[in-house]
Image: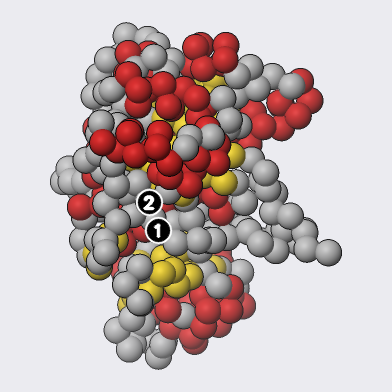
Amino acid sequence: MTAATPLDGIRVLDLTRVLSGPHATRMLSDMGADVIKLEPPDGDLTRYSFPRRNGVATYFAQQNVGKANLSIDLSTERGAELVRSLCDEVDVVVENYRPGVMERLGLGPAALLERNPRLIVASISGYGQDGPWVGRRAYAPVVEAESGLIASQGNARGGQLTKDPHSHADVYTAVEAGAAILAALFHRERTGRGQLIDVSMAETMLYVNEHLHNDLWEGEPDPQWIRSFRPGDYLVMKVANGESLIVAGHPAERGTFELFLSAMERPDLADDPRFADVAARLEHYDDLCELIRAFALTVPDPDEFERICAANRLAVGRVREPGDLARTDWAEARGATVEVDDRAGGTITVPNSPWRFSDGPGVGVAGVPKFRGEDNRTVLGDLLGLSTDDLDALEADGVLSSRVPN
């Protein structure tokens, strides 16, 4: 007997775009939910990104593979009514419009829940569905600046304030939204009731900042302790063949300092006044780092360096370029990436889901990245019972549209 995926039978209407919502709904799709992505006639912004082939952008494919696709003009009353009817037929609706937009479209959570009391509506926004900042525009870089991430990264670079390449606020919020949706589905199993989930990017960035407790601390610091582990101080060093590595652990921390000395076979440094205690080691941290880096340069290659460190209970990682890890034997053995159809006779490589369920072997990417509006007729015919004549009329009126290459 083939085991069902964890979310087998769950239907999700995805009203999101770009990254935070699409990543959350891809999670649900990979767990076995039937996800229906709805795009406006202009299409999701990420469809216009590069690289792309045959109209399929790899950015769009990574976040939306496996989802059915509709294209409905929500600015029309008939289009909004179609979506309201779809909300009666699904288990979960996910949206990341600015607060107030769904209400203006007649798709506010209260109205949808009145029609379908078992519905779960997850709303993703920058600062939440209420409060004094409810109307502010918010994208990942904006929220990362407001929440202190850019300042924290700048402090680690000597004060140079720059944005790194990754949309942390989007992806972290997607994961938190996905977890909340799963909890709401579990709650519905026990109560029979749906509900509204309000997830903000700003609160997410506070929630996932493991060092925020330290920034909120108002007591006097103790010079003999490393505050909140200070991973920004962890050493990146080179071995003899020129490759760079990082060791997890602060060299000045009590306990970890001794492990470094053991790995270097330099117990004598424990008697050096510069390194007598945590405060002294922090004061002379550059000297300590220089000694460790000099030792690393005597080790021929990363494998030998890791062997030495592992023997002394230190974890080591190579500093790889983006994409390198996905091309390793480890990634191949784990199935960390997957080839999906590029709709042009070839494939696109995207990351696979990271979960392994012992009783859900079908978990992971399933299906292909769809063209805009590709499933208009199939989904609306099956779920809403629309006839061919109905669908022809909706297309003629511009309510439905599609872009499917010949």
Residue denoted by label 2: 374
Q: Compared with residue 366, is residue 125 higher up or lower down, i.e. above or below?
A: above
Residue lying at the far front of the rendered structure: 389
In front: 98, or 288? Answer: 98
**SS at badge 1:** loop
**SS at badge 2:** loop
Q: Amino acid at mark 2?
A: Glu
Q: CA distance from mark 1 to mark 2?
A: 10 Å
Q: Hey, which quadrant is residue 92 in on the image?
A: top right
Residue lying at the far right of the rendered structure: 1
- Which residue is found at the position 68% from the left and 48% from the top? 8
Q: Hey, which quadrant is residue 173 in on the image?
A: top left
User: Where's residue 223, x and y in %?
Assistant: 44, 39
- Which residue is found at the position 61% from the left and 51% from the top? 31
User: Along the polypeptide, which appears first: circle 1 or circle 2?
Assistant: 1
- Which residue is found at the position 50% from the left and 25% from the top? 85
Q: Is residue 112 visible?
A: yes
Residue denoted by label 1: 369
Query: Which mark is on residue 203?
Result: none
User: Where's residue 339, x and y in %?
Assistant: 45, 72
Circles 1 and 2, Cβ within 8 Å, touching? The answer is no
How many neighbours does mark 2 have within 10 angstroms: few (below 14), some (14-19), or many (20 or more)? Answer: some
Observer-side mark, 1 or 2, equals 2
